Amino acid sequence: MMTSMNTLVCQEPKKFHWEKRQIPIPADDEVLIKIKAVGICGTDIHAWGGNQPFFSYPRVLGHEICGEIIGLGKNILNLKSGQQVAVIPYVACRQCPACLSGRTNCCENISVIGVHRDGGFSEYLCVPVNNLLVVDDVDPEAVALIEPFAISAHAVRRAAIQPGDQVLVVGAGPIGLGAAAIAKADGAQVVVADTSPARRDHVAQHLGLTTLDPSDPLFTGQLSATFGGSLAQKVIDATGNQQAMNNTVNLIRHGGSIIFVGLFKGELQFSDPEFHKKETTMMGSRNATEEDFAKVGRLMAEGKVTARMMLTHRYDFKSLAEIYENDVINNRQLIKGVIHF
């Protein structure tokens, strides 16, 4: 049996380094998985570039993970070798006020696999048993994408979307696409705004939704016309762009809600009179919970959420270091890539 594995380490911004490491041995409450597929997230891109909040180096990236169980800690009784799993990468303390209220996604002491601890850019990984979702009989690359879809599902849940709600999703990257797909599955009327014609085309082709260009001077009027004379009831911003986020208060109707699922290093600034006269509800959405992962699993089983809704590129793990800058960082056509092992 093999005892060593290949691991790709981000030593510092813009520097990858291959290491041979010992295959880890699972602790009593851990599971050892063989990695099958890993999604590349904006977090991985920003971390490589040195501008990701909550990050330190060196680090093994990768938190959108599909694996196969090959080893069990001695306390693991409800899982077995050979099962395919999605990794829930947010390791919570389960003791702080947030955790005790069920909001493990914003644990005060959260440790995210691939961010605060080493992640899936490696051939094997030990994962706490509470951070796994069994997903057999689903393609591994789709299982790897459960995590970004769960981020989107959490934002949709924060928005408390009901059938018939008129929802604007700003930003057609992976999280925006996921939010649009899940809001649609929940019965909302969804419009997606993005400045990229290619991304708007992707939305129309793979989600069948109306799209608008937010850089168009007529954008606000077009949005109102699409929703029958009113602005959006709920806006989910997945851009992480300061200007776009500042502008969301101008895109909701009176009594509307704004959910920020993207983030940036900086401060928001918007019209307080506009915010108040609309009695705006504004909230952040961070990570996802087990409930969100389970919902995505159900939607995948029903065919309402599919990998093709966001997946545009595939990569081979063995060549990742060599192609990362050109084929990932500088690839203007990339929406979501998955690494195969």
Image: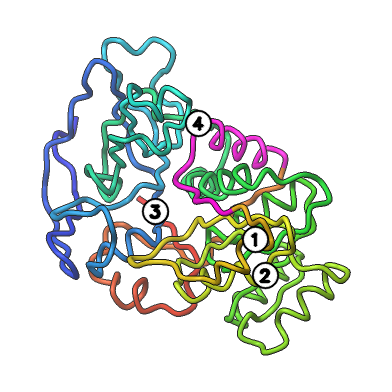
Q: Amino acid at mark 3?
A: His
Looking at the rendered structure, the secondary structure element under dot 4 is helix
Quarter assignment of residue 267: bottom left
Q: Residue at x 46, y 32 (%)?
A: 103
* Mark 2 and mark 1 residues within 8 Å of each other at the beta carbon: yes
- Disc nearer the start of the sequence (2/4): 2
From mark 2 to mark 1, how far is it between C-alphas?
7 Å
Part of the protein shown in magenta? 282-302
Looking at the rendered image, the disc whose residue lies closer to the viewer, 4 or 1, is 1
Q: Residue at x 53, y 36 (%)?
A: 293
Q: Residue at x 58, y 34 (%)?
A: 137
* Circle 4 residue: 290
* Circle 3 residue: 340
Q: Is residue 286 magenta?
A: yes
From mark 3 to mark 4, how far is it between C-alphas?
25 Å
Q: Is residue 100 magenta?
A: no
* Circle 1 residue: 235
Looking at the rendered image, the disc whose residue lies closer to the viewer, 1 or 3, is 1
Q: Residue at x 37, y 28 (%)?
A: 69
